[in-house]
Amino acid sequence: MADVTNLRTPAEAGLTKLFEVARMKFPTGVSIAREEAFRYFEAVGLPSRRVEAFKYTDLRAALKEAAPPAEAPPADAARAALEAAKGFSGIEAVRLAFVNGHLVAEGSDLGSVPQGVTVTPLEAALTNNDPLLAQLAPVAQTRENPIYQLNAAFMADGALIRVAPGAKVAMPLHLRFVGTGSDAFSTATRVLVVLEEEAELTLLETHEGPDGVAYQPNDVLDVVIGDRARFHHTRLNGEGREAVALSTISARLGAGSHIETVNLVTGAVLSRHQIYLYFGGENATATVNGATMLGNGQLADSTLLADHAAVGGVSRELFKTVIDGDATGVFQGKIIVEQVAQQTDGKMKSDCLLLTDEGQMMNKPELEIFADDVACGHGATCGAPDEDLLFYLMARGLPRQQAESLLVQAFLGEAVEAVTHEGARAALIGEVEAWLARRG
Amino acid sequence: MPAVQETVDRVRAIDVDQYKYGFETTIEMEKSEKGLSEDVIRFISAKKNEPAWLLDWRLDAYKRWQTMKEPEWARVSYDKIDYNDIYYYAAPKRAAAQSLDEIDPEILKTYEKLGIPLREVEVLEGIAPERRVAVDAVFDSVSVATTFKAELQKAGVIFMPISEAVREYPELVQKYLGSVVPVTDNFFATLNSAVFSDGSFVYIPPGVRCPMELSTYFRINERDTGQFERTLIIADKGSYVSYLEGCTAPKRDDNQLHAAVVELVALDDAEIKYSTVQNWYPGDNEGRGGIYNFVTKRGDCRGARSKISWTQVETGSAITWKYPSCILRGDDSRGEFYSIAVSNGMQQVDSGTKMIHLGKNTTSRIISKGISAGRSQNTYRGLVSAHRKAKNARNFTNCDSLLIGDQCGAHTVPYIESKNASAVFEHEATTSKISEDQKFYCLQRGLSEEEATALIVNGFVRDVLQQLPMEFAVEAQKLISISLEGSVG
């Protein structure tokens, strides 16, 4: 029985060609890691259904062609794109703007970053071999993830953000990722946030782009959270309807630290958001939520790995998916409790509302436990909106559509409520309402 | 009530006191040549006097098997199996078909503790009180005795070794064999299709409630053999049957392969209740020896309003790889899976179920309790899926794991695939250790630590035990308390 060698797809061959060209242009920082990452990707290729972690999201089939990395856009095009992007625009924040994956100084508040925060554009950091680069890729498991490694190979721009010890930054930092153009392009941005001991930061992220262009963003956020530091993160995926959007957040948690990350998805024809958490210090806590709303033709995948490697970690994961039309929702979650991680308390839940008979939801909430003094639970539910609840609302005079909308809002609300930043929470609720209004 | 005399006699003949003559020397076995080849398959087929179609079926399976790869996705690890180092057929020579007494004293002692041998002897002798259970005893590659056959026949129930059924009811066998687990279903099922030896065949005619419980008792005895039995149960319209399966094997230093296929077919309004107490030799504390239990079990609720219920108590085997499943094809059909898997020592369990909802208004329920102790790894792996047309499908899954000690692992890998808005799926799972409060409460009332643990564990697995036929439930409770000995303190 000979091993079958997969034929390389045009996209895989294209990526190799693109890498050969692009590698010459990158600044020298992390060039070894870059090479290794691409070699890894070349060895495994684009994952298909046969790869367990991609069972429900066939990237091999979805990525027909590799789009070329986008060049920095002309200033007026960048300005126009940033003006058109509305995500979180009502929130007072210090902004960093990326258009087609490139930092645009003109649209960024680089000169007014709050005290205690330093922001270094990634391109500069790579050129100068910034010492913070050593903290990239804080979670080991990402090295076996082809999406993450593709980003590591192609990452062109982004930022290194460091918050000094004890600095509690009240003003949120808003990373705006905006795509523009009429031809397919790809982006690979990398943002590293390092929170030193007892620091605190709120980070907002918005991802927006043109409808009708099959662009391919692959964004990574690396977070290193020091002891007793707190990180609040709210992310909005409002990508264009043809985008194949890949993203990863990988975070390492110090002792007594806290992370809150909430991701709301309405965009992209196919999106996969990966969350890697490594509980390296004792008594760290995490809240990881997702709210996904999908319509015809869309697929959204939320994949989570929480690795408890220290005593007393607490993780709460709640994913809510609403499916309209013939969309597909995917949730894959895995809580690992290592032998040393006694007194871990992990709870993971994925709920899905199917609004039509054509939609589908795939759930895979896994537990992998090696310690005996733990409490871990996982749950998954899936079903149509409760007829009794609908009846109750309709009996009070609401039309069916409105009653259903109300139920959807309440359903997603549970996931969105975890957002600490009031403005961001309100903005996410606004996104839910806008999605429901578009649905009609 | 006694069994038919000749059956009693026949079974007694098997049970004559061979025990004192030692273990492996006394039994004269007839074996195929070692390894797997077309010749071996022809040999098995010839031994069983099989019709040509079945030989072709086997050979076809063998051809396909050669192109297949051993599955690697399960959370188990073991040295590569040399499929050419196994005897695929081993049968006691008829003249010396005295077998069930030849058990190692150690194993006998264990079984005494479990309360199995006495009951088994009683059952085989047909003198079990009140409750009568018809037994098919499969010893290595052949069925050595089937009790109550004649009485069952009066009710129209066919209960016999599958090798006899192939000759006596070829049309039934041909119609249903491989219709639930296709020949090429998976690596081990295909291997089984090529080399299967004995197993039970059950047919319950329309409208008949099987007058007694049916049971097959599997035993691996011979060294270097594998057991590849095949069980086929067909419940025709409106019928009911409860079937029990028990299995044991001798203690040895090397591993033996058990790759069975069980197929259940329930037609309109029929119900099959399939219970297993799996107690294969689990290997020693260091992980030497034990059975590799790689089994494919699947039920097809083919008819409307049919019901299939799997109940399993798993304590044995070095490695378990088994997922008793239900295909809910008929409208309003129902599938159930109740499982307790206890792992100890170096055991590895990767077990669970699949509930595939195809018909309208189908319902399924999964209750799985995993207990890991020692240095074992215990994984629940399950799939619940609702297809487009499965309107109003309902599933409830509850899988709990309990860890005893900090050297073991408990894992849960559920797949929940919903392609239908009217389907309602609920899944919940927890992992915890025995609650200190509960233990303290028991200790305070004078129970020893071991008794307290046993009590709590029994409470934990009660949901499952309630589903077992009465007699098995008692046995299973004993099994569980034994399997956990030494885990506490």
Image: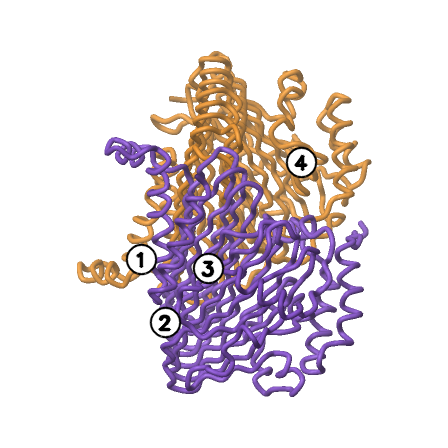
Chain colours: A purple, B orange
Q: Is label 2 in a helix, a strand or a loop?
A: loop
Tag shown at residue A263: 3
Q: Earlier in the sequence, mark 2 or mark 3?
A: 3
How far separated are the C-alphas under marks 2 and 4?
Answer: 57 Å
- Give the farthest residue toward the left: B445
Disc 2: CA contacts within 10 A as few (<14), some (14-19) or many (>=20): many
Q: Mark 1–mark 4 contact, CB under 8 Å?
A: no
Q: Chain of mark 4?
A: B
How far separated are the C-alphas under marks 3 and 4?
Answer: 63 Å
Name the residue carrying label 2. A312
Residue A39 image offset from top left, x and y in percent: 74, 69
Q: From the viewer's perspective, is residue B381 above or below residue A75?
A: above
Tag shown at residue B453: 1
Disc 1: CA contacts within 10 A as few (<14), some (14-19) or many (>=20): many
How far separated are the C-alphas under marks 2 and 1?
Answer: 25 Å
Tag shown at residue B91: 4
Residue B471 image offset from top left, x and y in percent: 37, 35
Q: Residue at x 36, y 27 (%)?
A: B131
Amino acid type, mark 3: Asn
Q: Chain of mark 3?
A: A
* Of the pair B432 and B263, the residue shown nearer to us: B432
Disc 4: CA contacts within 10 A as few (<14), some (14-19) or many (>=20): many
Residue B210 image offset from top left, x and y in percent: 44, 19
Q: Is label 4 in a helix, a strand or a loop?
A: strand
Amino acid type, mark 4: Ala
Question: Left or right of B448: which side holds B357?
Answer: right
